[in-house]
Amino acid sequence: MIQVGLAGWGDHDELYPIGMKSTSKLGRYHEHFAAVECDSTFYAVPSQQVVHKWVDQTPPNFHFIVKAYQGMTGHRKMDSAFTSNIHMFDTFKQAIAPMIEANKLACVLFQYPPWFKCERNHVDILRRTRAWMGEIPVALEFRHQSWFRGDMREKTLEFMREENWIHSVCDEPQAGEGSIPAVIEGTHAEMTMVRMHGRHIAGWVNEASSDNWREVRYLYNYNVDELQEWVGHVRQLEQHAKHVIVIFNNNSGGHAAGNAKQFMQLLGQQAAPMAPRQISLFD
């Protein structure tokens, strides 16, 4: 099974009628896509009440990919609200419990920062993280080339298989050590995920020096040939996993929803039309 979705549901205006309240968008989003990446959980651990609302607004066959809180991946120091790392993990797991109970959690995505290199202490962190997450399915995405350089490629993939990590396969700008190549390999029999970040090299490498990096980092519009290439990759991944979820994250310029629908059509899937827009006086 292949499902296509977007990173977040709130920033894709073309999916919703003009003026729709943000609290109503998830209830409309599922009319377009059967899966979504919840990225707000990266910035703050939600309450169970909020997660219950997300679950209630979606149909039984809907799936959430939930990004791990940034304190869990080393993007920031542990928040003072937590007494220990294990307390932080337990709080996060309790928060997403409604998704698990409703069988709507596809996985928790652990996206590690560019400075998370292939080193022994980082391998130990991955083992500890996997143990702390217990039976919850977890996906792993790197942002440093050392994990896939040379003979480390096969060693990293084998480690992920042994530790039951779902591989987050990425299409992203090839901009040196702070990016990874597209490694078309699954590591888990149940699921593989794909994240389409775009190929805007300048926006990708200028994160630290640019005040508007969020507006340009994922600024990219895939053409048909690029999407068709990934149809082949996804079909290949489908041979080794029961479930493949493809997430389009290239939305700095608002291209994600359109590219995702193009991709669905190339897969032979039906794609619902965008929401009707009010015609301007000058159209």
Image (spheres, grey):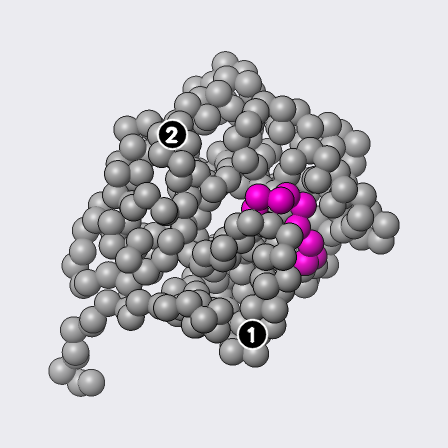
Q: Position of residue 102 (x, y in %)?
A: 36, 34
Q: Position of residue 66 (x, y in %)?
A: 45, 40
Count neighbours of disc 1 (C-alpha within 10 A) and say few if under 14, some if 14 to 19, many if 20 or more: some
On screen, residue 49 above or below 143: above
Q: Residue at x 38, y 29 (%)?
A: 101
Q: Position of residue 100 (x, y in %)?
A: 41, 32
Disc 2 is placed on an element classified as helix
Q: Locate residue 125 relative to residue 16 in the image: left or right.
A: right
Residue underneath mark 1: 228
Residue type of the residue flagged with mark 2: Glu
- Looking at the rendered structure, the number of numbered marks drawn on it comes to 2
Q: Is residue 187 magenta?
A: yes
Q: Quadrant of residue 252?
A: bottom left
Q: Position of residue 209 (x, y in %)?
A: 57, 54
Residue type of the residue flagged with mark 1: Gln
Q: Quadrant of the C terminus?
A: bottom left
Could you say which disc has been placed on residue 273 in the image?
none
List the single residue furthest toward the left.
Answer: 281
Residue 182 appears in the figure: yes
Task: Determine the CA span between mark 2 and mark 1.
Answer: 36 Å
Residue underneath mark 2: 101
Q: Residue at x 52, y 77 (%)?
A: 223
Residue 46 appears in the figure: no
